[in-house]
Image (cartoon, rainbow, N blue to C red):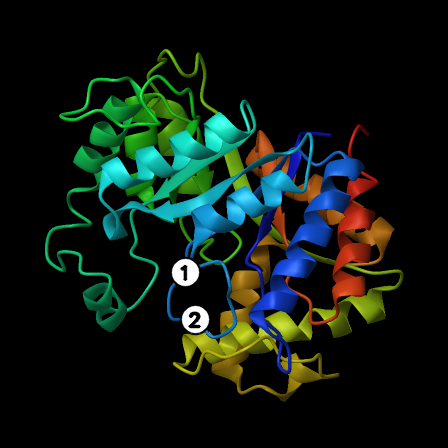
Amino acid sequence: MIPLSILDLAPITEGGSAAESFANTVDLARQADAWGFNRFWMAEHHGMPGIASAATSVLIGHVAGHTSRIRVGAGGIMLPNHAPLVIAEQFGTLEALYPGRIDLGLGRAPGSDRATMRALRRNLESSADDFPQDVMELMAYFDGEGPVPAVPGGGQRVPIWILGSSLFGAQLAAALGLPYAFASHFAPAQMLDAIAVYRRTFRPSRFLDAPYVMLGYNVFAADTDDEARYLATSWQQSFVRLRTGHPGRLPPPVRGYAESLPSQAQALLEHVLSCTAIGSPASVARQIHAFIDRTGADELIITSNMFDHAARLRSHEIVAGLIGGA
């Protein structure tokens, strides 16, 4: 089996709180550490009622401090929201505290709407277009060659990943010789094209000799297929609400949810579910292996937004049973 990792959005459930979310994130990370998962990543989102990972660097440090082996990082930091120097300092600090365990995935999208972008006080017109230059500036700070010293940061070897959901990120990762993570767990449309572009145009670098692709993948595993389908409805509800302009906290599961939707919403879910495994341990294993065979992924990063924390732990435990297997 290829390496398996976890993407955690620190979901806030209906009736829950950010504090409870963080406690659950730490609990999951500790279990993932023991189960043999490769990485534990968190993503930057702002203004999202159901996602508590906005202060991503802070949460990475919290999780790293409660684990011992697993790599911890950002999947990702939305670089248009930040000055590269600040990110170099933050992740230089994390690397100094937890040497050899920190990853930095960089995204081009702001991860928010225009009102939030204004609140973040970033340039609305040019910041996304400046992404390649910002990445290069950030890399220069880590190399100790920035316009001012990054302290800490300069001389730190923090692995940088390029994230993406289109061909742009694939092209940039290939040009810079960096590992590439594709957001197929929520935007699968250009996945195969992006993988092909990245692999075809990859330039070996001091970071990588050959292309390395990690793909986002949703998993909702349970002891039976029926239970897994039921548990997956929390995420389905949350996704439909987000795409229809009504984001909220993660709701409890509802039986028959997908079947109750109008045809347009059903089609939306079917599109996203193309990169999802739902079912019993045997069913999930078959689906994961088929996805790896279809894509040739070098690593999968699993996400599983479930309302019940115990059920979410059980889902990841089932996936962990594949680690080390053929």
> In whole angstroms, how far apart are the C-alphas of marks 1 and 2?
7 Å
Does 196 sit left or right of 299 as displayed? left
Task: Identify which amino acid the numbered label 2 is placed on.
Answer: Met
Report the disc number at residue 21: none
Locate residue 185, reporting x and y percent. Answer: 53, 54
Locate residue 303, reporting x and y percent. Answer: 61, 53
Q: Where is mark 2, residue-wise? A: 48
Q: Is residue 104 visible?
A: yes
Q: Are marks 1 and 2 in contact (CB under 8 Å)?
A: yes
Q: Nearer the viewer, residue 286 or 66?
A: 66
Q: Where is mark 1, residue-wise? A: 45
Quadrant location of residue 47? Answer: bottom left
Q: Secondary structure at mark 1?
A: loop
Quadrant location of residue 63? Answer: top right
Does 164 sit left or right of 212 as displayed? left
Task: Identify which amino acid the numbered label 1 is placed on.
Answer: His
